[in-house]
Image (tube, rainbow, N blue to C red):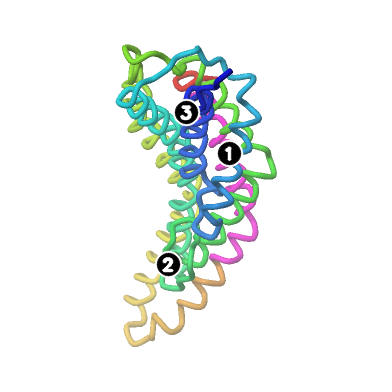
Amino acid sequence: MTYDLIAFAEPYLLIFARISATFFMAPGLSDTHIPVRYRLLFALALSLALREIIPIPNINFDGLHLVAAMIQETLIGSLIGFIARLLISMLDVIGNILSLQIGLGNAMVFNPSVGGQAPIVGHFVVTAGVMLFFATDLHHEVIKSVIHSYMYFPIAPDQSLFKGLSEPFEALPRFFNQSFTIACQLSLPFLILGILFQFMLGLLNRVVPSIQIFFITLPLQILLGILLMGIILSVVISLAIYNFGELYSHFLPKIGG
């Protein structure tokens, strides 16, 4: 008795392509400080565990069709992870707005989520948001969306490859617009603080032209910004994570869920 190892490994390979692509794009899991080997091992373990519950027809792909199927699985997985990354990026927008409005826009630290420099306040907001993302089990929604995506985008014969992928890709601009709008709305208290503070500085400069505005008011701006952060930042981050869950749940029917 002989076994076709290629036919045996094809389902695992295709599942692994979709799951690993998701993990390489999803927030938290795709950060640069997480070794690639760990992400691959986690994706491989999840692929082996999900093989029995994911419906996969008995299809033997030839060389070109297998490559096309791998590309399709990678695109679907990347899309699932990218939507989560796109929605969680509202924390980056909030953090950058906060940094500019409280006068700490030039205080930079290394941000592993983007692999580069970022304002220290923005890095704090992103780190707290990602921690809350895992604490509230929203990463389970990303994993469930991968599993449910096989209901809408199953591993199918070659004539069904890339069918139906246009709709979720067309929804990307709308999700980007919604996440950016929510980020600006949640940053509104700090925007109001910045506008009022700069307006008062302008009046003060007109009344007392000889005053050293920069050296006197910058510490005050930072102090007021830190006080406002201490009062409402926890609410802002919680609302951002809540809106992430709401927007991602609206995306799930388009990709499975």
Kind of residue sitting beneath label 3 = Leu
Kind of residue sitting beneath label 2 = Gln
What numbered label is drawn on residue 117?
Answer: 2
Q: Which residues fall within the magenta stretch?
A: 225-250
Verify whether residue 254 appears in magenta: no
- Secondary structure of the residue carrying tag 2 is strand
Q: Nearer the viewer, mark 2 or mark 1?
A: 1
Q: Residues within 10 Å of mark 2 (few under 14, many from 20)?
A: few
Task: Name the N-terminal-most of marks 3 and 1.
Answer: 3
Task: Name the N-terminal-most of marks 2 and 1.
Answer: 1
209 w.r.t. 178: above or below = below
What numbered label is drawn on residue 44?
Answer: 1
Query: From this viewpoint, which residue is outermost toward the front?
Result: 1
Quadrant location, the N terminus: top right
Q: CA distance from mark 3 to mark 1?
A: 11 Å
Q: Observer-nearest residue: 240 or 3?
A: 3
Q: Is residue 113 left or right of residue 53?
A: left
- Secondary structure of the residue carrying tag 3 is helix
75 w.r.t. 166: above or below = below
Residue located beneath label 3 in the image: 14
Q: Residues within 10 Å of mark 3 (few under 14, many from 20)?
A: many
At a point 52% along the width and 16% down the height, the residue shown is 56
Q: Main secondary structure of the magenta part?
A: helix
Q: CA distance from mark 2 to mark 3?
A: 36 Å
Residue 163 horizontal/vertical position (percent):
33, 16
Quadrant location, the C terminus: top right
Residue 159 horizontal/vertical position (percent):
31, 12
